[in-house]
Image: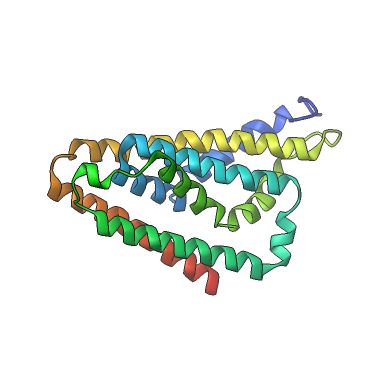
Amino acid sequence: MSTGYAWVDLSVLPAFIAAVLVLLLAPGPDMAFMVAAGLKHGRGGATRAALGITAGVSVYVVLTALGLGAFLAAAPGVAATIQLAGAAYLAYLAWVTWRSSGLPLEASIVKSADVFRRGFVVNIFNPKIVLFFTAFLPQFLGDANGNPVLQLLMLGLILQVLGLLADLAIGYAAGAVRDRVLHRTGVRRLLERFAATVYGALAAALLVNTVR
């Protein structure tokens, strides 16, 4: 019997939250991106990157609730085009980050809006997120009398909050490492080049997943 309201079934929440936590603890693209963002931009930049990622995920949560995941599943060419654009953007981030590694701090600072946009664009160019949500979120629809769109939006909101907290924790940890070596140019250069390598690896992985 349902123990929830029309917009969420409380009986499914424990299983849903447990599943989400397992997913968040598993290494993945967002985790790698947050490590790179924290190493390059510090804790403040990591915060903005995490908010950008969450904003990107928000778009796909809404698309999932509206049933547009089925469209992407039926139109692999559209999804592939979006992913190729994402791979190109990540490759661009890798190049920019590598080129600016080791520069004086005042010359390497990126505007807050730019860091937010990077997190947003990286996620919005990954249509596999909406395909994943299409398969994952409906498993936890509870009360058959409730509005499924509202339930999916609520489950997506819970996922976003937990994901944001996880991204912030990862980004802050990486940012704390960077902040300790701000004035050691050689070490900072190595960390920033590692961040560039992460971006490049993410671009390559996205490209491979698109063409195979």
The image quadrant of residue 62 is: top right
Q: Is residue 212 visible?
A: no
* Residue 87 % position (x, y): 47, 64
How far from the left and from the top, in percent, is residue 146? 83, 33
Would residue 20 appear left or right of 170 to someone viewing this image? Answer: right
Task: Give x and y (percent) for residue 181.
Answer: 17, 40
Answer above or below: position of 83 versus 36. below
| Residue depicted at x 33% and y 42% | 38
In the rendered structure, the answer to whether residue 195 lies left or right of residue 58 reads: left
Q: Quadrant of the C terminus?
A: bottom right
Display coloring: rainbow
Q: Name which residue lies at 38% across and 57% down.
A: 93
Q: Where the N terminus falls, by quadrant?
A: top right
Looking at the rendering, which quadrant does residue 140 occupy? top right
Residue 16 visible in the current orientation = yes
Estimate the x, y position of residue 132 in percent, counting from the top left.
Answer: 62, 53
Identify whether 190 is placed above or below 4: below
- In the image, residue 203 sits, relative to residue 121, either above or below, namely below
